[in-house]
Structure formats: C-alpha cells, structure tokens
Image (tube, rainbow, N blue to C red):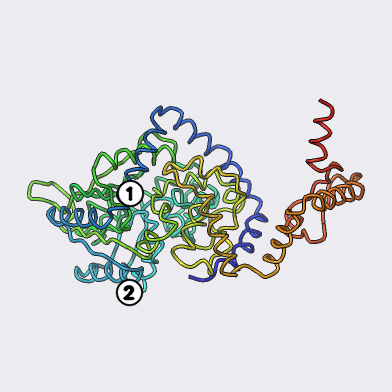
Amino acid sequence: MESTSDRFLLNASEALRDTPRAQRRDVMAAFTPLIRNAAVEGFAAFEATRQHVKRVRQHSLDNLAFYLGQFEHEAVQNGMRVHFARDAGEMNSTVLDICQQHGARRVAKGKSMVTEETGLNDFLQDAGLTVRETDLGEYIIQEAGETPSHIVGPALHKSADEIRDLFLQKHDLGERELAATGDMVDEARQVLRRQFLDAEVGIIGSNALIAENGYSMLVTNEGNGDLCANLPPVLVICTTIDRVLPRAEDAAAMLRLLVRSATGQAQTCYTSYYSGPRRAQDPDGPLETHIVLLDNGRSDILEGDYREMLECIRCGACLNHCPIYSSVGGHAYGWVYPGPMGSVLTPLLTSLEASAALPNACTACGRCAEVCPADIPLPDLLRDLRAQESEQRIDAARWRLGLRMHAWLARQPRLYRALTSLAMTLLHRLGHRRGAFRRLPLASGWTGQRDFPVPQGKTFMQRYRQRQREH
C-alpha cells in the first residue's frame, strides 16, 4: 500500500473544498446518530448484551486456535472445504485457483471489506475473469471506478443525480429519465439479474463463523448475498480468522448490537446461515462451498497491545459519530478502513510509518468509544499509536521539538500563565474589531480552512478566578 501519511492532509483538504459532498456529509452526521440512538434506546438490554458479547469475543480470541480448529472440523463435516491464507496474496491465489478449477469466467460478488483489503477484484480481473459487485452501493462505485467511502454504505458519498448520470452513461437501455430513486433501483436490479444467473462462482463475506456447527452467518438488507450464494454452482466465502464465535447464540447476540449500531434497525431484512453445499433433499444451493480464512497480520495483532481491535464487528458506528470522518469522508483515509476504526487498523495491518497521519486524525472527543457496540477503547488505542509514533521518531522533527517545548512550558505554571495571558491580551487587542483572524503566524493549518475567533482577552484561569471572587 502507498503511504497514506503524505496523502491524508491533501485528500482531506480536497474533500473540504468539495462543497456539495461536504454538505451531504453534514446531513449524514446529523441524522445517523439519531437513528442509532433511537434503536439503542428501544433495546433495554443493549448495555448488558454489549458486555456479554465483549466477554465472548475476548474468550474467542483467547482460544482462537481451538475455535478455528473446531470450526474447520464441523465445516468439513458439513461438506465445505476450508482454506487458510496467511496474507492477501494467498487469499487471492486460492480464490483464483478455485475459479480456474471450475473453468469459471464470471463471478457474482457480495459486499466484502476483506476482499477490498486484499484487492481480490483487480486480481481476478487481471486473470481474465469478469467480477460483478451485486450490493447496490458496491455496484455503483464499481461502475464509477471508485472505492468504498464507508464500510456499511459504500456509495454514501454519491448524490442521486450522480448515480442517475452514471446509470444513463453505463447502461445501454435506450431513452429513459430515471426521475425517481425507485427507477434507478429497478434498473440496477434489471441489469444485475442476468449477472446472478450467468455467474459460475459466487463470492460473499461473513459476519460470523460459528464453531459449534461450522456455519457462516451473513447479514444483508438487499438479499444479493443469498443470490450470490445459492444461484452459482460454486460458493466462496472470504473472511478473516477473528470472525469465529463459539456458539450460534453468540452470533445472535452480536447481531442485536451490529444491526442497531450500523443501520438503526432492530433486525436486517436478511440474516442467512450457510451450512455447506446442496444436499440431496435441497431444492437449490451451491454444489460446492469453500471458506477462505485470512490472517494477514491478525495473529501479530492478537499477540500485541492492540488486540482489542480484533473485537470490532464492522458496524460503522464510530464513523457515523466521528467529526473527522464526517468532515472529510472515507476516501481521505487512503485505504480500505476509514474513520476511527480504520485509523487503528490501517497502521496495524500495513505499518505505522506508512500511515502515521491516521492516528492523528482525531479530536479526542471520545464519541467513538461511547457508541462502539464492541466497547473498544478507540481513543486509547489512537493515543498509544501516537506515542509509538513519537518513540519511533516517525513524526516530523519540528513536531517533536514543538511538543517538547510545550511539555517544558506546561511544567512551569507561572511562566505558562504569564505567556498565555500576554498572548490572549495581544490577540484580543489586535482582532477585537474584526472578530476573527483569517491568518495567523504558525497557525496556517487552522486558518487555511477556517477563521480563528478572536479571544475574549482573558485566559480560562483568569476568568475562572474572577468568577470565584464574584461568588
């Protein structure tokens, strides 16, 4: 992966200048938390379920080898074929080998962030296969030649007009208007129907692997996952080793948190359990089922200080509540996983040196930790990564010098108060007629995107002491 550190600030600046998309992000940032909060408030057992699922996830990770072994045994007994992939290259090669063994040329694919992580689509297409995304959001961005901007809603960054123009350009269906959103959905359904019927291989992801019975659970709202799984003769499920849970009831408990946190629903339209290839008495289903389990650095994370990140259930709640994500959007982060969860995962899955800007893309507001259904202390993990960045001298020398100077000054309370008082008084006198500064020395990073409000003339401590004297 290319370094995201050099690109993040550039991407963020470009995103802020794109006014229409910035306005749409503002709308999303306003109403998605309301939807999530209403769903959580309507589920009295949310916090108890949250703590239960956390204990289960911790137990699963503590005993990961055991539960992976149990899952593999049960899945094989069900007629599945289980493959383990150490890295992205092994996963992609395994999937390609399966396709080539069956002479497949067409693949119908459900939404999967894991295959985004490994670059599976490009790998299969370079080998001559046609890969068609069938989730509506993924289909839209595939047609547009873009990448997902959100782990749940891949095309949230696109407007209805952009999608309409895209369909009119890409679909050779003659003259039509596509005036309503329903018209566009109907047209996508019409185009994709043939893709489901013609595909020789279906590829989907998994929200949970159930060790006790060897089943794979998938949650969708469109039903495309079931069509990818049941219509093509060969099914490939791509997921990661940390998705395994001991029991079916554990997956059901996680589902209660996932859906409310992701979309504000009590239940998704489709929750499917895949138990293996078609049996003699089954009317439909794949003739062959493969599960490819990816490690790609997760074993290293499990043994390190950031293992709690493996408890993430990919709901996107931290993105929806993050002021940085809502300001700059998912593409600014430069890789597969955006927002707070991505700012932790990307350095762990790639390298901190290549993505040092991401742990710093945080206001420390703590909202991500408050809403995380997996109860992951995301702000703590981001701070730890920033500390590691400083220890390894990855950040710029000027930043280290500035922080050392600030740390020294903060340990001199009288000098600190005198200097801040002088600065507040000076800035107030210089700018009180204007109300804000458009430019300030040493603060171009702030004033490049916004005005700096003129201070009121006194520091917080001065105002606090004055108020104490008055009372």
In this rendering, which labeled residue sits more in front, label 2 or label 1? 1
Q: Residues within 10 Å of mark 2 (few under 14, many from 20)?
A: few
Q: Is residue 468 left or right of residue 274?
A: right
Q: Residues within 10 Å of mark 1 (few under 14, many from 20)?
A: many
Q: Residue at x 32, y 73 (%)?
A: 128
Q: Position of residue 393 (x, y in %)?
A: 60, 70
Q: Residue at x 36, y 35 (%)?
A: 49
- Which residue position is annotated with label 1? 207
Q: Residue at x 28, y 61 (%)?
A: 293
**Three-letter code for the amino acid on which mark 2 is drawn:** Ala
Instruction: Name the secondary structure under disc 1.
Output: loop
**Three-letter code for the amino acid on which mark 1 is drawn:** Asn
Residue 469 placement: quadrant: top right
Q: Please identify the quadrant where the C terminus is shown.
A: top right
Closest to the observer: 171 or 200?
200
Closest to the observer: 53 or 255?
53
Closest to the observer: 325 or 187?
325
Q: Is residue 371 above or below residue 382?
A: above
- Which residue position is annotated with label 2? 127
Q: Is residue 119 left or right of residue 389?
A: left
Residue 10 placement: quadrant: bottom right
In the picture, the disc for residue 25 is none
Upstream in sequence: badge 2 or badge 1 = 2
Q: Position of residue 323 (x, y in %)?
A: 60, 47
Q: Is label 2 in contact with label 1 (beta carbons under 8 Å)? A: no
Looking at the image, which residue sits at the far top? 471
Q: Measure the C-alpha gap from mark 2 to mark 1.
A: 28 Å
Q: Position of residue 44 (x, y in %)?
A: 41, 27
Q: Position of residue 320 (x, y in %)?
A: 52, 44
